[in-house]
Image: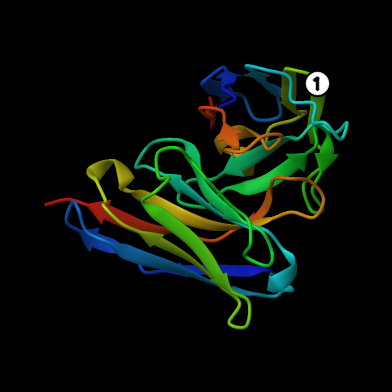
Amino acid sequence: EVQLVESGGGLIQPGGSLRLSCEASGFAFSYYWMHWVRQAPGRGLVSVSRLNPDGSHTNYADSVEGRFTISRDNAKNTLYLQMNSLTDEDTAVYYCARGSNDWTGIDYWGQGTLLTVSS
Amino acid sequence: DIVMTQTPLSSPVTLGQPASISCRSSQSLVHSDGNTYLGWLQQRPGQPPRLLIYKISNRVSGVPDRFSGSGAGTDFTLKISRVEAEDVGVYYCIQSTQFPHTFGQGTKLEIK
């Protein structure tokens, strides 16, 4: 069974930094693209970033480019999102998600971790 | 970025009746490889999204056959043939033809 378990969310002040983690199990992690998607409270879904299987190719949404860094440790089956210079607009549930081998989109989602940026 | 526009944003439906959600993209979703990367997600209250349909009309294993997808180019539709209580939630279309992947605003399906 595919499982994606996010951790690392919490309350942080504007301007701060935080790293999210996503531990994957139930599939061959090193063969899949991985994504971060966020959802602000009561709002819709927004793609944040994605990373190819060997970690050599990344994409970012314009809103986080230069502030967020996606990475992975295939030996630990773990995906990361380093977030710097946080603002209140980054407040959201952050979902870790697996890229599908059947299409270019996502097929499995984690339960999400809540990041709140507030003073 | 490709803009995805869903209608309606809210859909009250009687149990056992059909429901239909439309999704329109601001540009064609036909990829250079010839595929159209349009999918549909369901998000039940308090849950993460769940993929129902990918590449317009391919149902994910385990998804009831009352869910079907259709469309081409820039216009797509999700249909539920007979709504059940467990179908309550928000439905999103998603395009993954181009990054950033973008989502519709969501359609809230509720029971009358």
Q: Position of residue B102 (x, y in %)?
A: 57, 33
The three-letter code of the residue at mark 1 reads Gly
Q: Quadrant of residue B87?
A: top right
Residue, far left: A119
At horizontal 29% and vertical 41% (from top left) the residue drawn is A89
Total marks in image: 1
**Above or below — where is A72 with respect to A86?**
below
Q: Residues within 10 Å of mark 1 (few under 14, many from 20)?
A: some
SS at circle 1: strand
Q: Quadrant of residue A27?
A: bottom right
Left or right: B84 in relation to A87: right
Percent x, y for residue B72?
81, 20
Residue farthest to the bottom, as pictured: A75
Q: Which residue is located at x 80 percent, y 32 percent? A: B68
Location of residue A104 in the rendering, given as x and y in whole percent from the top left corner: 74, 45
**Chain under numbered label 1:** B
Left or right of A116, for residue A42: right
Left or right for A83, reference B98: left
Viewer can see residue A9: no
On-image quarter of the N terminus of chain B? top right
Q: Which residue is mark 1?
A: B71
Compare residues B8 and B109 and report the one nearer the observer: B8
Q: Residue at x 55, y 61 (%)?
A: A110
Task: State how the image is colored.
Answer: rainbow
Residue B56 position (above or below residue A55): above
Above or below residue A14? Residue A11 is below
The location of residue B48, given as percent across then percent down, is 53, 52
Using residue A91 as the reference point, say whether residue B61 is left or right of it.
right
